[in-house]
Image (spheres, grey):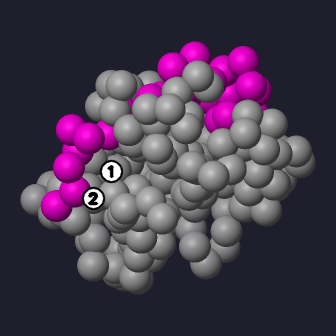
Amino acid sequence: MKSIVILHEGNEKNTHDNKLIRLLMEDLQLEINAVSFFGMGAKSNFFKAASYPEFLTEGVNKTIEKVLLIVDADDIKNDALYGGYENTQHALNEIIAQLNFQEVSSTYIMCDPMTKTGYLESFILSTIPEQQKTCIERFLDCSQFKSKENHKAILNQIYKMAYPNAPYDFKHPHFNDLKTQLTQLFAESE
């Protein structure tokens, strides 16, 4: 087992969540092979102790030295318990304390940093130039997609088509907190 674990929504395959993290780690020249990525499935699984992999609950403070939990904020309008930045952070703090990960864990809540709502795609949209962002938002508004999953999929497809050669602007200041979180995983423990 590797000493660094990143838990994220989705699965271990090439999902949007872990693809972004891997690309950012490459950009930061961090050793991707030193990290075990673990997909937790749905966001709600982060708040259930039984959803955490056994290797993690047994390995913390033995072989696992650092754990980063990356979760979407979503929107409080859609989920009064776990939706929104503050509710998500509070629920993560509770489960981390319950599992006794406090000393080795950190969290990153994926959202539009300005509104503190949304998900990975909202975060990405917040990093593109205003003119392109407005264009994408207008398309989404007029398309009237009601499902969150459809909205996320459409937004991701539009973004990939619009920026096929340089999909993420890692120099954008909205990436700074995530860069810091990832870099700290490799910092020597005190």
Pointer 1: residues within 10 angstroms few (<14), some, or many (20+)?
A: some
Q: Amino acid at mark 1?
A: Leu
Residue at image coords 67%, 34%: 46
Residue at the disc numbered 2: 24
| The quadrant where residue 3 appears | top left
Residue 20, label in figure: 1
Q: Position of residue 25 (x, y in %)?
A: 26, 56
Q: Position of residue 112 (x, y in %)?
A: 56, 68
Check disc 2 and report its element: helix, strand or loop: helix
Among all residues in the image, which is located at the extreme left?
A: 165
Q: Is residue 161 left or right of residue 36?
A: left
- Residue 47: say if magenta: yes
Whether 63 is drawn above or below 169: the answer is: above
Q: Amino acid at mark 2?
A: Leu
Q: Nearer the viewer, residue 11 or 32?
A: 32
Whether residue 140 is visible, yes or no, is: no
Contact, CB < 8 Å: mark 1 with mark 2? yes
Whether 65 is drawn above or below 113: the answer is: above
Distance between the alpha carbons at the discs numbered 1 and 2? 6 Å
Check disc 1 and report its element: helix, strand or loop: helix
Residue at image coords 68%, 28%: 45
Q: Position of residue 30 (x, y in %)?
A: 22, 56
| The quadrant where residue 149 appears | top right
Quarter of the picture containing the N terminus is top left
* Extent of the magenta region: 29-56
